[in-house]
Image (tube, grey):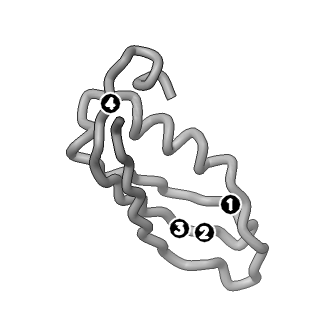
Amino acid sequence: MSMARTGQAHSGKAVVSFAIGADGKPARLQVDAPSFQDTPLPGCVTAQMSRWEFPKSQKGGGQVSYPFVFMGS
């Protein structure tokens, strides 16, 4: 992530909310990360998670919220 390259070390939590479509791909990704406002982290998380794939389902997978905790050093 580019934050590490610039020497910034942030800590905080990011809660990612998304839906899992019937095709197994995440949709409607939202990142709630107040500690990382004005940093590239929310966009980086969204870009990476948009590549994820879950098992396909005829019903779809529903809505998910997942917390990520980042520790700066």
On the rendered structure, is 16 left or right of 24? left
Does 63 sit left or right of 22 as displayed?
left
Q: Tell me which label, 4 or 3, sits earlier in the chain.
A: 4
* Foreground label between 1 and 4: 4
Separation (CA) of disc 1 from disc 2: 6 Å
Q: Secondary structure at mark 2?
A: strand
Contact between marks 2 and 3 (CB within 8 A): the answer is yes
Q: Which residue is mark 1?
A: 25
Q: Residues within 10 Å of mark 1 (few under 14, many from 20)?
A: some
Residue type indicated by callout 1: Lys
- The tag earlier along the polypeptide, 1 or 4, is 4
Query: Which residue is tagged 3?
Result: 19
Q: CA distance from mark 2 to mark 4?
A: 31 Å
Q: As displayed, is residue 10 above or below residue 2?
A: below
Q: Position of residue 18 (x, y in %)?
A: 48, 63
Q: What residue is shown at x 60% (from left), y 69% (from top)?
A: 20
Q: Residue at x 72, y 68 (%)?
A: 54
Which label sits on residue 63? none
Q: Nearer the viewer, residue 7 or 42?
A: 7
Q: Which is more foreground, mark 2 or mark 4?
A: 4
Disc 2: which residue:
20
User: Disc 4 marks which residue?
Assistant: 9
The three-letter code of the residue at mark 4 reads Ala
Pick whichever of labels 1 and 2 is earlier in the sequence: 2
The disc, 1 or 3, on the residue closer to the chain's N-terminal end is 3
Q: Amino acid at mark 3?
A: Ala
Q: Amino acid at mark 2?
A: Ile
